Image: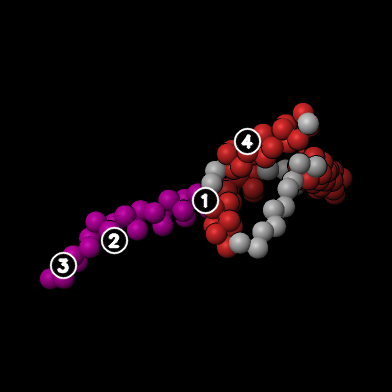
Amino acid sequence: MLHHQNTPEIIETTNSRLEKLEESFMNIQKSIKEEPKSWLQVATTARRKHEKQEGKRIELTKLRKARAKYALTVVTASEETRRKLATVPHKYIIESLQHTIDLNIEQ
C-alpha cells in the first residue's frame, strides 16, 4: 500500500487544478453562447479601449508636467550628505527647504 506523506497538499493541488478547469470550461461555454460580434462591434470596442488608454496617457503626461514644476535635483559632493538625504523623510527635507526659501524672501 502506498502512503503519501503530503496527501493534504496533493488534494489541495488537485482541487485547485479542478477549479481552474471548471473556470476555463465556464468561460468557453459563455463565449459559445454569446452572439458573434460584427466587425463594427469589434472595431468600436477596440477604438473605445484605445481612446481610454490615450486619455490615461494624456492625464499622466499632464500630471508629470505639473510635478516637474516642483521637482528639485540636489547635487552634493559629500557622501555623508547623500546618505543623510537618503535616510531623512521627504517631509522634513521639504520643510527645511521651504523654511530657507521663506527666510530668503523676507530679506
Please tell me the numbered disc located at residue 10.
2
Please tell me the numbered disc located at residue 87.
1
In the image, is 47 to the left or to the right of 31? right
Instruction: Pick out the residue farthest to the front.
Output: 107
Q: Is residue 95 visible?
A: yes
Report helix, strand or loop for mark 3. loop
In the image, 32 versus 17, the foreground residue is 17
Nearest to N terminus: mark 1 or mark 4: 1
Q: Which quadrant of the view contains residue 65?
A: top right
Q: Marks 2 and 3: in contact by CB < 8 Å?
A: no
Does 8 lie within the magenta span?
A: yes
Tell me the distance, in whole angstroms, between the alpha carbons under discs 4 and 2. Answer: 57 Å
Identity, as a three-letter code, of the amino acid under mark 2: Ile
Disc 4: which residue: 95
**Nearest to viewer (mark 1 / mark 3):** 1
Please tell me the numbered disc located at residue 3.
3
In the image, is 44 to the left or to the right of 22? right
- Start and end of the magenta stretch? 1-24
